Every structure is written in structure tokens, then in C-alpha cells.
Amino acid sequence: MTEKLTDYKYKTPIPIRFSDIDSFGHVNNAVYLTYFEIARIGYWKEIINWDWSNTGIILGRSEINYLKPLTVQDNIACYVRTIRIGNSSFDMMHVLVRITPQGEEIVTTGKTVCISYDYSANKSVPIPSPERHRMINYDEPRLILNTN
């Protein structure tokens, strides 16, 4: 399935560091998860205003579709949005793009399952209502599968 960038509102630039590069001159496959994490954290801080003192988030699952390689010379950004909201878990979609003079080229897509988590009790908890509503309102109800 091809992602439509017009479905995404949140985008953040991602710096490619020299340490991200493998011996073949490409961004190492494991680093893409870090790029997704940078985008998610920005989204949660800047848009959702997640209250970390109340509820944490852990990652339950990650999927990555490597479409085109990246090199240290590339200028990239990551789009992210919530695509499903359940009771205690929610799915986020990530799209890495290479920024070129001709426009943005999708190079990698990925999905993560995030779990609302109480670290003191060591268990999943319902997604806090304010954060749930901000995710739905920001990413538009028509684009989110609400399974709760």
C-alpha cells in the first residue's frame, strides 16, 4: 500500500549522522527505528502533549518496509501519524522521505504498535483521555481506526 503524504500533518527533519552509515555507504537498517523514534517523540511532545509524569509508552511491535537506500548525503524527513486507537494500544505509521529538488521521494515506511504503560505497576493501562482525543482530533477521525 502506497502512503499518501497528504494524509500526514506532522513532519520532522531527521539528521543522518556519519555513525548511521554501514560499510557499504548506506544507512544501517537498524537505524531506521531510531529515525521513527525521533519523529514519534516529537509528535508526542509537540502535538499530543503526552503527560509522561502520568503515563508512559512502550513499543510492542515494529515493522519496516525498506524501499530505497539512504546515504549520508541525503536530506530526509519523517512523517508520522496515529492510524489506530484501541483501549491501551495505538498504531502509528511512519514515512521517511528523501528531499530532492524535484520534491519528496518515499524511501521507507514503517508501523509501530505503541502501548500506554504504567511503569510503577509494570502493566499496560488505558490511553489517557486527553491524549486519546488529541491524537484523534489532530490526525482526523476519518483517518483513524478506532477499535475502542
Image (cartoon, rainbow, N blue to C red):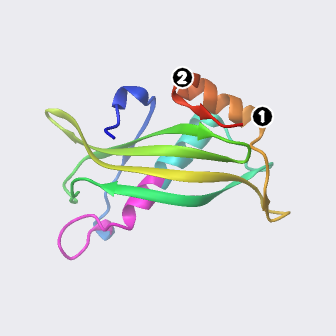
Which amino acid type is shown beneath numbered disc 1?
Answer: Ser
Q: Residues within 10 Å of mark 1 (few under 14, many from 20)?
A: few
| Residue at image location 54% in from the left, 22% down from the top | 142
Classify mark 1: helix, strand or loop: helix
- Left or right, residue 138 beside residue 77: right
Q: Residues within 10 Å of mark 2 (few under 14, many from 20)?
A: few
- In space, the residues marked 2 and 1 are separated at their CA atoms by 19 Å
Say which of 46 and 88 sits in front: 88
Classify mark 2: helix, strand or loop: helix
The disc at residue 142 is 2
- Which residue bears the numbered disc 1? 129
- Left or right, residue 103 beside residue 83: left
Q: Position of residue 136 (x, y in %)?
A: 62, 28
Farthest residue in the left direction?
102
Q: Relative to 124, is 42 above or below?
A: above
Mark 2 and mark 1 lie on one chain; the one further toward the N terminus is: 1
- Residue 9 image-quadrant placement: top left
The disc at residue 56 is none
